[in-house]
Amino acid sequence: MPTNDWWSSLAFQRYGDNPYSTPMYGHPLTYQATVGGLDVGYPTTPAIVGDGRQYEYAHKRDLTIGLTGLNSPDTKADDWSDWTVTPYWSDGSRTLRTTIGHGSPFVYAKGSGGNAQITTANAPTVFADQGNVLGITVAGHHYALFAPTGSDWNIAGSTVTAGLGSKDYFSVAVLPSTGALATFKKYAYSFVTGSKVTWSYTGGTVGATYTLTTEAKEGTERGTLQALYRHQWLNTTDPLTSYTYVSPRGTMKVRESASFTTRQKAAPVLPALPKSNGVDTARLRGYLNDVVNASDPFSGAADTYWTGKALGRLAQLVPVADQIGETAVRDRMLGLMKGKLQDWFTAGGANEFSYDKDWKTLTGYPASYGSDTELNDHHFHYGYYVYAAAIVAQYDPAWAAESAWGGMVKTLVRDTANPSRTDTAFPFLRGFDIYAGHSWASGHQGFAAGNNQESSSESTNLSAALILWGSATGDTSLRDLGTFLLTTESESIAQYWFDADEQVFPSSFGHDTAGMVWGSGAAYSTWWTANPEEIHGINVLPVTGGSLHLGGEKAAIRRNIAEMERENGGPAVEWRDILWEFQSFADPATAKAKWDAGNAGYTPEEGESKAHTYHWLNTLDTLGAPDPTVTGDIPTSAVFTKGSTRTYAAHNHGSTARTVTFSDGKTLSVPARSTATGTGTGSTDPDPDPDPEPPTGNTFQLRSGGALTTATGGTAGSDTIASAGGANRDGTPYQPLVYEVRGVKGTLNPGAGTAFRLQVDAGTTVGLGQQARISYDFTGDGSFDRTETYQYFASDPVTGWEEYTQARGLKASTGNPGNLNGGTVRLEVWSAIGNGTSKLQTGTDKSVVVIPYS
């Protein structure tokens, strides 16, 4: 039984009060199963509800796809795959199956016992009539109806019908424009039959390929169209069409193919922050003793969630105690964790995990928050147990053996994040929505707004736990699954919870973060409180070595903290430790200063401790903030940057020493079963890969005076970017800085794209946005054959340089890529918005353009 998915209400039919479904948000289309078939909508205008605290693109029916006379008593899930599902209706005389999915602009229908019938919400306007192909506009949205060749659509008011003859198929598509009809007609009879993702981890990079299987109902076409979410198209170099759709996750872009591939730099993970000289050992020892000597280290926790948080609190401290030589404290904490885990892992007694053979799930009792009755939150709860078990396994491999307690850990993993599609005891990846790029918390999805997830960080806590458990037990397949899940969800969190690029939340929403994401949108709220500290903090906790990916979006963190303090009427009080740690991902010194000023009189958040918070803040103040732009070639590695100094860290779970190589060319020798840190050895590649990983090609630094050069060792400087003069220059260069290199020869790397990393500084001026355009003149004849204009970068009035990369997304392009034969490459940078000048760094390896040529 699939649960915790975008369409789970179709299968759950909760309490028998809805034998069909609640609204299901596939994007761009929305759906709801009803007695007469499938209601379909395409919401394109957001509504702000809940006193301005929620935006939603709520499902609203444009049309219903059915059969004449269909009157089904219920709707069942007939088939499903990684992100598609086939609802099924039968009334004894007629049967209807429709295949729908994330990213699909098509609904593929198969029916018997009646004619194809489309019932529209109001009388449709016809813009194209080709007999068996009909273009109609309903509620301002354009749809195409495709019946078998030889049939004809007939309109009577709001009812459109077509006889199927000896056939049983028809399809409906939402069009991005009326002019797209011919393209969509090409794929209208290439019916999707399944969807599947495959993933890989190699040398610090996560690759994922998303593939649809199809069958040709007419002709031989087997391709299709699929709309990519923002977190996907930001990380693919596969060609996309100019077609786009509106969605609650920002613009979706259409690919004309049955598959696409994404590549991302792997999210960093460590068992704990490494040892540093910024931590006072005696003070830390005192804080550790406060935890281990408490009368009840588990704080009275009884159910799965609160016991898990208590286990997580201890798990964070075990490596910390070990790195300062407090082995007795370390072992006492390990003993506490083992005892509690073994208690839960043993059947009988006050608490246990129990398998439900009907629902194919493992439920911990005492349960909480609907984890038993509604199958909610399993990934939240069990992630803490797997994480704690991974820390135990790091120090006691025998305990983690399959024949000892590892079998129970593996069973928790199978319940929450089962890597197998053929396991008959648990569904594949229960909580993780592969195409949406994040998990869902509700088991039944029984809400008008679709499914939801509040604590995205407790979801990634499970993924980090898979990496650590897989690394500790030698299960590289599970380790790589965890890396795929964590890396994918980290991008989704940045875009959909934190609006890192400020391209997702509607401008009318008025918030810089979301406490929870819904199928229909997002909300500045939590399930239990309107306290701003918890709205902002719930997507941060627990702060662990698996949280380091948050450091990739420093501007978003600063906006987030600033909003929290505005809404809160001042700095955090209740969850101050969580929010100090969150701030440390961007501004460690500021976060430590807050600790220094306020550590005496606060109560730690339930999953935190003064020992961990003290160690965390002082370590990052010493090493610098996490720097996810540089990755190691094992998942358990990370980089920290302070000023111009990078510190490299890695944990080696293996039994022999190994050398970890980082993407900027540095290496680090790591002893067996140890964490190592250092400034790295070997020459540094002047092009540490930005995110997403740039293609193979030549790297050009900017030089003041307008040159692009492959030379290194320049003198750091800057050029002034002229003001936009208060006008909107988005997409059109205005008094740009121009940098150029001529006489370039190069062969285009297939499938690759341009990358750049530009350091910009708005000074203290607010409301500025810098924009880049890169142009290619293939032969040097003075005519540019290919131009790429990127979305502008909204800079902040913060101290120091900010980084603008191609990850902002391509706004527009002209021409097709081609080889360079004595060609010219030009970079233009200008102010797209604002009324003030800004600066662009030159002469360093931090401001570069990487062209996709060899």
Image (cartoon, rainbow, N blue to C red):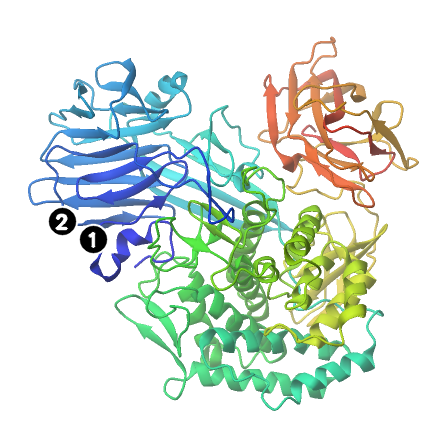
Callout 2 crowding tier (Cα within 10 Å): few <14, some 14–19, many ≥20: some
Q: Are marks 1 and 2 in contact (CB under 8 Å)?
A: yes
Q: Residue at x 30, y 23 (%)?
A: 144
Q: Amino acid at mark 2?
A: Pro
Q: Quadrant of residue 827?
A: top right
- The first of marks 1 and 2 along the sequence is 1
Q: Which residue is mark 1?
A: 19
Callout 2: SS: loop
Q: Position of residue 157 (x, y in %)?
A: 18, 22
Q: Residue at x 73, y 76 (%)?
A: 601
Q: Position of residue 823 (x, y in %)?
A: 74, 16
Callout 1 crowding tier (Cα within 10 Å): few <14, some 14–19, many ≥20: many
User: Left or right: where does residue 843 sit relative to residue 694?
Assistant: right
Pick whichever, 762 or 553, lies toward us. Answer: 762
Q: Compared to 483, does 471 lie above or below?
A: below
Q: Which residue is mark 2?
A: 73
Q: Residue at x 56, y 67 (%)?
A: 474
Callout 1: SS: loop
Q: Residue at x 85, y 22 (%)?
A: 706
How far apart marks 1 and 2 lie (CA) works out to 7 Å
Q: Quadrant of residue 718?
A: top right
Q: Position of residue 164 (x, y in %)?
A: 14, 26
Q: Position of residue 480 (x, y in %)?
A: 54, 57
